[in-house]
Amino acid sequence: MQYRAIVRILGLLVALFSVTMIPPALVSLVFQDGSGLPFLLAFILCLVTGILIWYPNRRYREDLRAKEGFLIVVLFWTVLGSFGALPFLLLEQPGMSITDAFFESFSGLTTTGATVIEGIDYLPKAVQFYRQQLQWFGGMGIIVLAVAILPILGVGGMQLYRAEIPGPVKDSKMTPRIADTAKHLWYIYLSLTIACTVAFWLVGMNLFDAICHAFSTVAIGGFSNYDASLGHFDSVGVNLVCVVFLWIAALNFALHYGAVSGRSLKGYFYDPELRVFFIIQFSLVFVCFITLVEYSWFADAGIALDQALIQSVSVSTTAGFTTTDFAHWPAFLPIMLIFSSFIGGCASSTGGGLKVIRIFLLFLQGKREVNRLIHPKAIYSVKVGGRALPDRIVEAVWGFFSAYAMIFVIVMVCLIATGMDDVSAFTATAATLNNLGPGLGSVAGTYADVSDSGKWILVLAMLFGRLEIFSLLVLFSPTFWRS
Amino acid sequence: MQYRAIVRILGLLVALFSVTMIPPALVSLVFQDGSGLPFLLAFILCLVTGILIWYPNRRYREDLRAKEGFLIVVLFWTVLGSFGALPFLLLEQPGMSITDAFFESFSGLTTTGATVIEGIDYLPKAVQFYRQQLQWFGGMGIIVLAVAILPILGVGGMQLYRAEIPGPVKDSKMTPRIADTAKHLWYIYLSLTIACTVAFWLVGMNLFDAICHAFSTVAIGGFSNYDASLGHFDSVGVNLVCVVFLWIAALNFALHYGAVSGRSLKGYFYDPELRVFFIIQFSLVFVCFITLVEYSWFADAGIALDQALIQSVSVSTTAGFTTTDFAHWPAFLPIMLIFSSFIGGCASSTGGGLKVIRIFLLFLQGKREVNRLIHPKAIYSVKVGGRALPDRIVEAVWGFFSAYAMIFVIVMVCLIATGMDDVSAFTATAATLNNLGPGLGSVAGTYADVSDSGKWILVLAMLFGRLEIFSLLVLFSPTFWRS
Ligand SMILES: [K+]
Ligand SMILES: [K+]
C-alpha cells in the first residue's frame, strides 16, 4: 500500500475543504449574526492541518491502484465528515455534543439529511447555510465517486458503466481520467444548482432560502433551513420546482454528461433505467394520490395531488424533504414510501438506496430464473437496453443486495439493543442506509432523542449506504491489508 | 400440459388423504369426546371426491415433465390444504368460519403452526390430535418435496443436491425415482417420530401428549394441544427432548438417508451446512443466555439457560413452540430470534426459512465479491465442502433470496393495508413466510384477531414459504402456460 501517497491526497483534500468554511463566514458577515468567528477558526484549523499532512508527503505522486482507491474513498468521507464537524463543535449556538456534531456533519456530507437539531429556524444564518452547503459538497463528492471511481473499482456491478474501456483498466490511467471526468461533472452540477436557485427564487423564495434549498435539492440531501422543511413555504410552486429538480438529480449524471458533451437529448430516451425510474415514480404518486383521496385525507383532490407528488418523489428519490406529516398518512402509505427509498435514485445520481438499475437487474434475473425452471435446457441471458450483461455484473449486483440486507439486519438489531423501539429502529436503519433522512415512529421528525450509541451506529449506516457497502466492506477483509 | 395425468394424481392424493381422517375418528372413539362423526363424514367426502376425480382419468399414467411437476407440487398443498379444512368446517366445537378453517388447515399442513384457535385445551381430543397430525403429514410432504422433487426441478439452487445425476435429468425417470426415495424417507421420518414419542413419554408426558408433540416436533411445526404450548409442561426434560429432536429434524434428511443406507455416521461430520447450522445454533443460545442473565430476567442462571436453549432453538429452527413469553424478552432478543427464523433449518429438512446452506452460499459469495474487488484479475470460485459450485447454482440462490425479499415486502404492505400495525405486520410476514408460527405484537399469541383478508394473505405467504417461492412463482409466468 502506498500510504504516503494516500496521506498526501488526504492532506490536499483537507486543505481544499478548509475553503468551504469561507462562504458561511461571509454569510455571517452579510447577516451580522455574530457566528463568523467559529467558521474562520475552522478554516484556519483545516488549512493548517491539511498543509501539515500534505507537506512532508508532497513528492509522493505515484499513480494509485484499486486498493488505494478504496482507502481514499473511505477516508474522503470519514476525514471530511470529521473536519466538517468542527464548526458545530466551535459554535456556541447551537451548543452541540461531540456525538451530535459528528452526526450532523456526516448526515450532511453523506446527503442523508437526518438532523439532531431542533429549532433550526432560530440558528444563525451562517450555520443554516453551512448545513446546506455540506450537503451540496457531499452531493458533488457522490457524483464523482459514482461516475468516475466506482465503475473503475467495480463496486456492486457498477462496472456496467465502465463505458468505453475494454478489458481490465490500466492502473496507470486512473488518476488523470478521474480528474477530467470530475471537472465536467462539476460544471453540470453547478449549472443545475444555479438553475434550481433561480427557479426557487422565481416561485417566491428569497435568495437565501433559494440557494439553501437548491443546495439540498440537487444533492438529494433533504436538509432545510426551516424545522418545517419544505412545508414552511406551503407553496405548490415550490413543491413543483423541487420535484422537477429532484427528478433531474436522481437521473444518472453520465446521461447529463453525455447530453452536454454530445449536445443531444437522445441518451435520455434510450436509457432503460430512466424508463423504469419514471414508471416507479408515477406509480408511487398514483397510489398515494388515490389512497389519500379514498381516505379524504385532505380538503380537496388538488391538495392531495400536490402532497402525493412532493412526498412520494421526496421519499422515493431519498431526498427526505417533508411538506406534511407523511409518517401519519393512512394505511400502508408511510411504510410503502419507506420501502420505496430502498429503490432510490438511478445509479450515478445523488440519490441513495439500492439504485433503480440494480432493482431492475434483480427483477430481470428473477424472470430469468423462472424461465430457466420452465425450460431447463434453454439458455437465457439478462439483457438491458438490448445488450446481454456478463454474469460477472449480475453476480456483483446480487452480492450488493445481500450485503445490504446483512448490514441492514445488523444495524437494526444493534439499534434495538440500544433501547430503540422496533418501528423506529427499522425505519431509522432504512433512512440512514438509504441516505433518506426521516424515518417513522420516534425518528419521524429529528434524531435528537436517539441515544449517543444509537447515533454512532446510524453514522456508520450512513457511511455504508453512501459508500455502496462494498467500498467500506473491503476494508474489513484481511486480504485487503496483506501487501 | 398433460392435464388429465395431473388430475389423475390429484384424485389419488385426495383419496389417500381421506385415510388421515380415520385416526382422529379412532381417537374420538377412545376418548368418547363425541366429535367422531365430522371426521367420518370428512373421510367419506374425501374418498368419494378423490375416486370421482381419479376414475375418469385412471388410464393417463404418462411420465411427467418439470412443468407438470410444479403444478402437482402447488396443487398438492393447495388441494390437500383445502380438504384438510373440511373437519374444521364440519365440527360444532370449535365452530370455525371458512377463513379460520382454511387458515388452520394450511398453517398445519405447511408446518407453519400459527393458530387462530383460542382455548385449545378445551377442544375435543380428536380435534387436538387432528391438528398435530396435519403437521406431521405436512412435514412428510416437505421432506419428499425437498429431497426428491425440488433438486430435480432445480428450485432455488437445490440442484446442488441432485447428487449422482450428471447433466440434465432424463424426464422419463422422474416418477419412479421420486417414489423410491419417498419410501425410504418415509421410514426414517416414521422412526424419528416413534423415537421422539418414546422420549417425550420417558420424560413424563402421557402417551397422547407425547404422540401429539412428537408429530409437531419432527415436522418442526410448532402446534401443541395446549394453549401454553410446551410451557404447559414446565419441564426441563421435555424441553431438552424437544431441542434434540428439533435439531435432528432440522438437518438435511438426505444425510439421515445416507447414514441409514450406508450404515455410517461419517456423512454428518463432513457436511459443511451442518457445521454452519450448529455454529449458528450455539451462538444464538449463547447470546440469549448471556443477555437474559445480564438482565436478571429469570430467578437463576439455570432457568435462563433452559429457556434460552428451548426458545432460541424453537424459533431459529422455525418450530415456533413457546415455553415463555419470549416476545417480551429484553432488548434485541425478540427481534433477533425473529430474524434468525429467516435462516431456518438446513435444506431438505422440515424447517422453514431461507435455509442454512443458502445463507452460507450468500456469505461465501459476498466474500468472493470482496476478494474480487481487491484483486480484480484473480479468479475466485465459491467452494462448499471442497468442491467449486457452478455459477448456475449460485445464481439460483441469489434469485431465491431476492424473490423472497420481494414477496416479503408485498405481503407486509398488503397486511398493513388491511389495518395491521407495523410490528405485527412485519413479524407476521416473517412468521408465515418462514413457516415459523408466532410473531410479535398482536400476533405473538394467536392469529385470532387478524382480519379475514389478512388471514388469506398470510395463507398465501405460508404457501410461498413452503413451496420455496419459485415453485409457486413459476405459475404466474405466461411462459409456463404456453404449450
Ligand atoms: K436524503
Ligand atoms: K413452524
Image: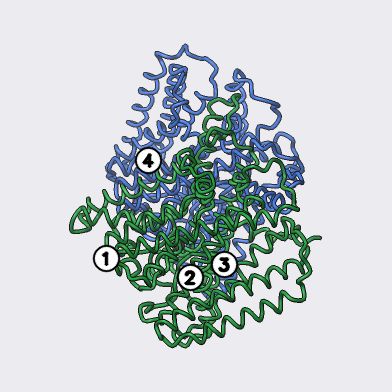
Chain colours: A green, B blue
Q: Nearer the viewer, mark 1 or mark 2?
A: 2
Which residue is more in the foreground, B176 or B174?
B174
Q: Nearer the viewer, mark 3 or mark 4?
A: 3
Q: Nearer the viewer, mark 4 or mark 1?
A: 1
- The count of marks equals 4
Q: Secondary structure at mark 2?
A: helix
Rendered view: A52 above or below B102: below
Amino acid identity at mark 1: Asp
Asked if the residue at tag 1 contacts the one at tag 4, i.e. Cβ–Cβ closer than 8 Å, the answer is no
Q: Nearer the viewer, mark 1 or mark 3?
A: 1
In primary-sequence order, the first of circles 3 and 2 is 2
Q: Which mark is residue A234?
A: 1
Q: Secondary structure at mark 1?
A: loop
Q: Is residue B230 left or right of residue B190?
A: left
Residue holding disc 3 = A460
Q: Secondary structure at mark 4?
A: helix
